[in-house]
C-alpha cells in the first residue's frame, strides 16, 4: 500500500542530508540556501527576519525573537501599506515572508505575493475553485495558508487539490487531487513542508467522510504515504494501529465515513522525526448513529504522533473518547521544552474545543496535566493519571435521548485561531470563547447526500423569537485571551471581549502580544500582564493570526483582515455579539512611523424588516423549519438570521415564489456558491422554506417594534 511504500532515492537523499542538519545549531544560518531555496535548516532558523511556515517554526510557538518594536515605542506603530482583496469572505491565512516578499492565500483558495517594503503586487494566482464547492464547506470558503520548500510554495484548495507554485512567478508547477471529489471533502488548512515532503489533511467530517493525512513529494507531487485516522470496515485494515482501533467502534461506522478529519493543526519535532496531528470530530456527531453501542472510537478527538519519514503510527492520546459534541482536537498544537516538577520535559500543549488545556510528553504521549481553561459542564474534570474525562452523564444526549445544553458548545472553548507561547514569560495565550450549544438528538436520523450530517436536530435547537431567551444567550456568550501557565496549570490573567471569534495570537521578544478581534480592532498588549498598549481600527473583524518580520532596517507586523468563518455565518443573533461587523478584506502591514491611511469606512446600512404577510399553514412552516435547519443554517444563519451572507429575512425573493424557485431550485446563482437544490428537494419542499423565512421575518419585525 502507498502508506508503507519506500521513499524514492532522490527524496531519501534529501532526508538523509536534512536530518543531520536538524540536530546542529542553525542560529547563524541564512534563511535560504545559495540557490534561494527554503530548506530544513532555514525552517529552523532563529533570527526571525522571515516567517517561513504557518507557525513560524516547526514547534508552532508563534513567538518571534524580533525586538525592534517594544512596549516603549509600540505607540508609534502606524500603517506602512495595505492591499485590498478581491473576495469578501473570511480571511484566515497566516502569511509567509521570504527574503523581503510576502506570500499568502485568501478565501476561495487564491494566492498573492507582494513586495514587503513597497506593497507592490508581484503576482496572483486563482485555482478557479468551482462555486458549487461552497456547499461542501462546513465553515466558510476560507484558506489558512501556505507552505514553502525549495523554490516553491504549496497550498490546498477548497475542492481538494494540493498545488505547487513557482515562488518567483506564481505559476502552477504541479497539482494533485488529494481527495475523492465526489464526496464532501474540502481543504482549508495550511500544509507543512518537512524534509522534501508536503503534508496535507482535509475537512468534511460534518458532511460524512473518513479522515486522513497525506505526504507528497515536494518536487513531483507523487504520493509517498497516507495515514488514516479511523478504521475502515473490519477485514480491510492492514495496519496494526487500525486493527486495534476496530475494537473501539460499533455498528457499521464505515458506511457513514466515521469522521476524524485532520483539517488544521500539525507540528513537527525534527530531533524525534515525529509529526503531530490533531484529529477531528466523529461523523456524524451523534454517537448513537455513528457507533451504536458506544466505544472510544479511535482515533477521533486525539493527538496522534506519526513517524514523518515513513507515515507509520508512533503513539496517540485521546482527549474525548467516544466524542459526540464536535469536540475536535484539531486546534493549534505547540511544542516546547520546559521544567515540570523539577525535571526537563519535551512537551506538546493544546487547548482543544472540549475546554481542557493539555500538557503531554511528546516523546511517548504520556499525559502530564490537564485543567479547564474555560467553563465546562459536559465533564467534571480529568482523571489525574490517565487524563480521561470524567463525564457528566446528562451530557450524553446520544444515550439519554434528551437535549443537553453544553458548555463549551460545538464552536469550542477554542477554535482554529492560533495560540502563541512566550518562553520568556512562560505563558500560552489562548484566544478563548465562552459559548454554549443546545444538542437536540435527531429522531430517526438518516444521512443526506449534501449538507450537515450530524445526527443533531438544528431546527429544534434554533434560537426562539423570545427577547428574554435571546438576551440570556447573548449575556452568556463572550470571549477572552486567556494567559495560561502550563507549569502551574492555571490562568494568570485574561483580556475580556464582548463576544467570541477573536483573532489568532503573536508574541514577540519586544514583550508584546498582538491580536485582532471581532470588534474590528487590531491591538498590541503587554505579554506580561495583558495591558493594552496600542490599537488600530481595521474596519472589519480580524480573525487571522498576525506575523512579524524584518525588511530593510525595520521590523514589520502584518495581518490579513476580513470577517468570516462559521461564527459569522451560522450563529444568527449571536453572530454580532461584539458589534455589527462587515467584511472588508485587506492585508494590513505596520511599522514604527508608518503613515499610510485607510480610506473612510463605508457607513453601515441599517435595514428594517418589511416582509410579506405570512400565508403558510403551521404544518407548512414547520416543514420549512426542518428543511432550513438541515440545509440552510450553516450559510444563512441560525433561525434565518443572516450574518456574513445575505440575510434571507430581508430578501425580495420572499415576495416572489417564482424568483425564489429560480435561485433555490434552479441554481441561477450557482457560480457564487448558491447551488440549486433540485436534486435534493422538490419545489414544494423549497416553497416551505420560503414560508418559514417569512414567518421568521415577521416574528423579528414584531420584536423590533416592541
Image (cartoon, grey):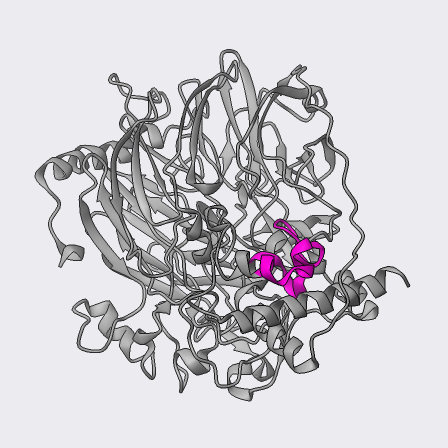
Residue at image location 34% in from the left, 19% down from the top: 30
Q: Quadrant of the N terminus?
A: bottom left
122 to the left or right of 568: left
Res. 264 visible in picture: no
Query: Which secondary structure dominates the residues rendered in magenta?
Result: helix
Provide residue 387's location: percent of width, then percent of height.
47, 69
Q: How many marks?
A: 0
Res. 78 visible in picture: yes
Residues shaded magenta: 635-660
Task: Place residue 196 in its image quadrant.
Answer: top left
- 307 shown above or below 522: below
Provide residue 573's location: percent of width, then percent of height.
72, 59
Q: Quadrant of the C terminus?
A: bottom right
Residue at image location 56% in from the left, 22% down from the top: 556
401 to the left or right of 203: right
Between 5 and 459, the one nearer to me in the picture = 459
653 is within the stretch colored magenta: yes
- 506 shown above or below 639: above
Between 167 and 415, the one nearer to me in the picture = 167
114 to the left or right of 413: left
Provide residue 126's location: percent of width, then percent of height.
39, 34
165 to the left or right of 224: right
Amino acid at each position: 500500500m502507498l502508506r508503507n511504500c519506500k521513499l524514492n532515492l532522490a527524496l531519501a537523499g534529501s532526508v538523509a542530508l536534512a536530518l543531520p542538519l536538524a540536530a546542529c545549531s542553525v542560529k547563524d544560518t541564512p534563511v535560504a540556501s545559495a540557490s534561494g531555496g527554503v530548506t530544513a535548516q532555514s525552517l529552523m532558523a532563529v533570527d526571525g527576519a522571515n516567517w517561513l511556515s504557518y507557525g513560524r517554526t516547526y514547534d508552532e510557538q508563534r513567538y518571534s525573537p524580533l525586538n525592534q518594536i517594544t512596549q516603549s515605542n509600540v505607540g508609534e506603530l502606524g500603517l506602512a501599506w495595505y492591499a485590498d482583496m478581491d473576495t469578501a469572505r473570511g480571511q484566515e491565512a497566516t502569511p509567509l515572508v521570504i527574503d523581503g516578499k510576502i506570500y499568502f492565500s485568501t478565501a476561495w483558495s487564491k494566492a498573492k505575493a507582494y513586495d514587503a517594503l513597497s506593497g507592490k503586487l508581484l503576482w496572483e494566482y486563482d485555482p478557479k475553485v468551482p462555486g458549487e464547492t461552497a456547499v461542501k464547506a462546513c465553515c466558510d470558503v476560507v484558506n489558512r495558508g501556505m507552505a514553502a520548500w525549495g523554490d516553491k510554495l504549496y497550498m490546498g484548495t477548497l475542492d481538494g487539490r494540493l498545488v505547487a507554485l513557482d515562488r518567483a512567478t506564481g505559476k502552477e508547477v504541479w497539482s494533485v487531487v488529494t481527495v475523492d471529489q465526489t464526496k464532501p471533502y474540502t481543504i482549508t488548512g495550511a500544509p507543512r513542508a518537512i524534509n522534501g515532503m508536503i503534508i496535507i489533511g482535509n475537512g468534511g467530517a460534518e458532511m460524512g467522510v473518513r479522515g486522513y493525512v497525506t505526504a507528497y513529494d515536494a518536487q513531483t507531487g507523487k504520493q509517498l504515504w497516507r495515514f488514516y485516522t479511523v478504521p475502515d470496515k473490519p477485514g480491510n485494515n492492514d495496519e496494526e494501529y487500525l486493527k486495534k482501533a476496530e475494537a473501539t467502534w460499533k455498528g457499521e461506522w464505515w458506511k457513514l465515513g466515521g469522521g476524524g478529519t485532520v483539517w488544521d493543526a500539525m507540528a513537527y519535532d525534527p530531533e524525534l522525526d515525529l509529526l503531530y496531528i490533531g484529529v477531528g470530530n466523529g461523523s456524524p456527531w451523534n454517537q448513537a448513529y455513528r457507533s451504536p453501542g458506544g466505544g472510544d472510537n479511535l482515533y477521533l478527538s486525539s493527538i496522534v504522533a506519526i513517524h514523518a519519514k515513513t507515515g507509520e503510527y508512533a503513539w496517540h492520546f485521546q482527549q474525548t473518547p467516544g466524542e459526540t459534541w464536535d469536540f475536535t482536537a484539531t486546534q493549534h498544537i505547540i511544542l516546547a521544552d520546559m521544567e515540570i516538577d523539577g525535571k526537563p520535559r519535551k512537551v506538546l500543549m493544546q487547548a482543544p474545543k472540549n475546554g481542557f488545556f493539555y500538557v503531554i510528553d511528546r516523546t511517548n504521549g504520556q499525559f502530564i496535566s490537564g485543567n479547564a481553561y474555560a467553563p465546562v459542564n459536559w465533564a467534571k474534570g480529568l482523571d489525574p493519571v490517565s487524563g480521561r474525562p470524567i463525564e457528566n452523564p446528562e451530557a450524553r444526549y446520544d444515550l439519554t435521548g434528551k437535549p443537553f445544553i453544553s458548555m463549551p458548545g460545538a464552536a469550542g472553548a477554542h477554535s482554529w485561531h492560533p495560540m502563541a507561547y512566550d518562553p520568556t514569560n512562560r505563558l500560552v495565550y489562548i484566544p478563548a470563547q465562552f459559548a454554549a450549544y443546545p444538542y437536540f438528538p435527531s429522531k430517526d436520523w438518516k444521512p443526506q447526500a449534501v449538507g450537515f450530517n450530524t445526527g443533531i436536530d438544528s431546527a429544534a435547537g434554533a434560537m426562539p423569537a423570545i427577547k428574554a431567551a435571546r438576551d440570556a444567550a447573548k449575556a452568556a456568550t463572550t470571549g477572552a485571551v486567556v494567559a495560561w501557565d502550563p507549569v502551574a496549570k492555571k490562568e494568570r490573567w485574561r483580556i475580556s471581549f464582548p463576544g467570541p471569534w477573536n483573532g489568532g495570537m503573536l508574541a514577540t521578544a519586544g514583550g508584546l502580544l498582538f491580536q485582532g478581534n471581532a470588534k474590528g480592532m487590531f491591538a498590541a498588549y503587554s505579554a506580561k500582564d495583558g495591558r493594552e498598549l496600542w490599537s488600530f481600527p481595521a474596519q472589519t473583524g480580524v480573525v487571522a493570526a498576525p506575523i512579524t518580520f524584518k525588511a530593510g532596517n525595520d521590523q514589520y507586523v502584518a495581518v490579513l483582515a476580513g470577517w468570516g468563518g462559521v461564527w459569522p455565518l451560522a450563529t444568527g443573533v449571536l453572530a454580532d455579539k461584539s458589534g455589527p461587523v462587515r467584511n472588508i478584506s485587506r492585508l494590513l502591514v505596520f511599522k514604527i512611523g508608518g503613515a499610510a491611511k485607510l480610506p473612510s469606512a463605508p457607513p453601515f446600512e441599517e435595514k428594517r424588516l418589511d416582509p410579506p404577510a405570512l400565508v403558510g399553514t403551521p404544518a407548512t412552516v414547520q416543514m420549512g423549519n426542518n428543511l432550513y435547519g438541515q440545509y440552510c443554517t450553516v450559510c444563512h444563519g441560525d433561525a434565518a438570521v443572516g450574518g456574513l451572507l445575505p440575510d434571507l429575512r430581508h430578501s425580495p425573493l420572499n415576495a416572489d415564489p417564482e424568483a425564489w424557485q429560480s435561485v433555490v431550485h434552479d441554481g441561477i446563482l450557482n457560480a457564487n456558491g448558491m447551488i440549486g437544490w433540485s436534486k435534493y428537494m422538490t419545489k414544494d419542499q423549497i416553497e416551505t422554506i420560503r414560508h418559514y423565512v417569512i414567518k421568521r421575518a415577521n416574528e423579528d419585525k414584531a420584536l423590533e417594534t416592541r
